[in-house]
Image (cartoon, rainbow, N blue to C red):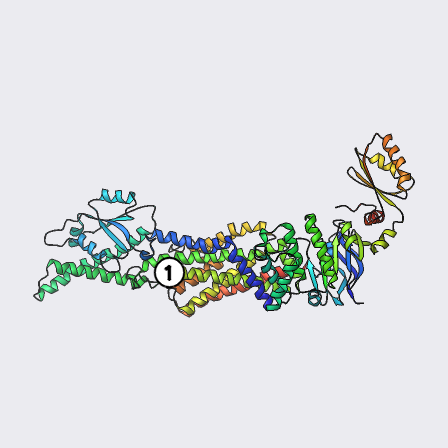
Amino acid sequence: MENAIEAKGLKKFYKDVKAVNGVDFTIQTGEIFSLLGPNGAGKTTIINLLTGLFPPNAGDAFIFGNSIKKEPLKAKALMGVVPQEIALYEDLSARENLVFWGKLYGLRGKPLQARVDEVLELIGLRDRQRQRVSKYSGGMKRRVNIGIAMLHLPKLVVMDEPTVGIDPQSRRHIMDNVLALNKQGMTVLYTTHYMEEAQELSDHIAIMDQGKIVASGTHAELVKLVGEQDRVELTLSQDGDKVLKEWKKVKGVSKVDQDGERITLLATDSNAVLPDLFRIANQFNARISSIAIHEPNLETVFLHLTGKALRD
Amino acid sequence: MKKIFAIASKDLLRSIRSLYFVGMSLVAPLLLAFLFSTAFGGGDDSTAISNIAIAFVNQDVPVQSSPNHGEIVYQIFQTTGLKEMITLHDVANEAQAVNGINEQEFSAALIVPADFSQAVMEEGQTAQLRIIYDPAKSITPQILEAITTTVADGFSSSKMMIPLAMEELQRRGGQADEQFYSKLVERITSQSQKSSGVATSMLTVLNPQGQEGEVNDQVQQIISIIMVGMMIFFVFYTGAATSESLLQEEETGTLARKFVSPTRVRDILAGKFLGVLITLIIQICVLLVLSSLVFYIQWGEPGKLVLAVVALITSATGFGLFLMSLLRDTRQTGIVFGGVMTITGMLGGLFTSTIQNMPGFMEILKKLTPQGWALELWQLVLAGASYQQILLPFSVLLGMAVVFFCIANFRFQRRFARK
């Protein structure tokens, strides 16, 4: 089967910052591929390189065989891009926005108008198509933002964190849209820092940190990487530096990460290590105010691979 | 090409919908036009630049056997061309006239002193007419002064010519009575007005009835020069304001979205540039038509007018794009609108266009700004200059436009390619 995207040795540096530092991956036609990672991991930079917004310092990417460096217009014509920020003309209506962007993708006349009608139906804004975008809610704007990328029926849809900062209902709507697009045969490249989204949507997931892909595979393959480890989340009522230092020494605890009062650790058998964790906390007069034990998931994988929790 | 037009038409639609644009490019010039119209005593559509109320105080005491020269002055103001513009109201004395001015009843007063006839008749004496005006009105007194100066010139000519004419008439056996004398003065004065008007005319002015005016030329000259200065200022301002959309789009992410579409960077920039150009064409057309309707200005020969419009919009577009290409983001645009546009407008002479004989260094500074060259070109077109005469400012403006456009294009291309 033809590869939708083939990235080879992509690098992008900003002065001393290695935003993307030698990334290789392949996305097969028809799959949903997620790039999962915390903010600053390099996800958006990869999207910007793949969509030709700016050139890589090294490496190349091929969109259905078209080099983004040598044949950028051909490659771009095959893609529909949903940027992270809402990029719309607020003083134009949804229909006017769609018509304008459709023209930039080469649509004209009746086919354009017909396609705009279809997209408005799909994003649920047919009734309010003549209203200016400035009057829309955040969720409605997001839907128009996505609708633009679907106008020219691209073979590949690239979505950069499309659910950031929106209500759960709109988020659900967007995720359903992604699945619907995929069912229509579109390949989807999706970036997110929400583990649940990647888990629900993706056929393949690449986990990114500090400009590199640290692991890649299906959800099941990735979870296997951490073996039978549980992820234990605790909240300490006071500064826990000394407690954490001792917890790291407990047999069966492999990783410990702290974010303020919230502490995340990996344990091979959570039942076995919990008594020791409580005992050490007591020794330092620290109070554990909450505790949660999670089965292995992508969060566990990320902690296992990077030593850091994958936070919102 | 279709994508370029798509971008340009979208920008035009956004401009037209923008209250800021409509306010600055159309309402502001119109508002100023209205203020000028009011200053001229207009306000009513049918009486634009007309019916300026002037108090007339005739204190003249004629010498024996001579006509009342104060009355002749009054009659001159009743001639066709003048009476439509200035309405004289007889007032008993100077105090009443001043009171009327204070009460806003009159824009100014024309005082004929008691010794006026005597001064006109006797050799060696100087006849004087006095004008008292409302200091709040800057233009009406100028109009009255201009007309009165012409009338006074007529009297001066009469003073020299009439004794000779009377002598010749008597030599031929004719009899000169008071009516003959009055008619002679009136005709000489009227002829003097015509000569004066023709010499300084820059425009053809039609009165509300569509007839050619005789003495409105000087007034129209003032209005047209002010109008041209105003129009050039606002066209350059709009050029910069619409060019700002490039920076705005960069910040809102729509420019990046265009870059990830299958559209070349040069086409995107061309579309943006064309959008600015079309916006300015619409603005200038609206201003030309409205100023013609409000002030009855005929903007000269169509061919030359088209050249002036082309030079103005290309230079304003180039200048606006050039300025925006120097800025990092929209937070810096205040410098352009508050500073650069105002200062270059001032240096270009847009706010002092009615002042004659500016210092030499100001004339040099004027030539450093596109606004200065635009003003010169438009003034030449209004004055009916030949194609050869307008060639230099036209070429300089086009040259400036090309240079500004190239610099802006280079800077924007580099800016969007270097990330």
Quadrant that contains the N terminus of chain B? bottom right
Q: Would you identify the image quadrant in which residue A148 lies? A: bottom right
Q: Is residue A135 left or right of residue A159?
A: left
- The residue lying toward the viewer, choosing from A8 and B170, is A8
Q: Residue furthest left?
A: B173
Q: Residue at x 48, y 52 (%)?
A: B342
Q: Residue at x 13, y 54 (%)?
A: B67
Q: Is residue A282 left or right of residue B217?
A: right
Q: Which residue is mark 1?
A: B293
- Residue A312 image position (x, y, % from top left): 74, 46
- Can see residue B86? yes
- Residue A280 image position (x, y, % from top left): 87, 33
- Can see residue A249? no
Letter of the chain that mark 1 sits on in the rendering: B
- Residue B277 image position (x, y, % from top left): 52, 63
- The residue lying toward the viewer, choosing from B121 and B77, is B77
Quadrant that contains the C terminus of chain B? bottom right
Q: Is residue B328 left or right of residue A250?
A: left
Q: Would you identify the image quadrant in which residue A70 lies? A: bottom right
- Kind of element beneath mark 1: helix
Q: Is residue A215 above or below residue A268?
A: below
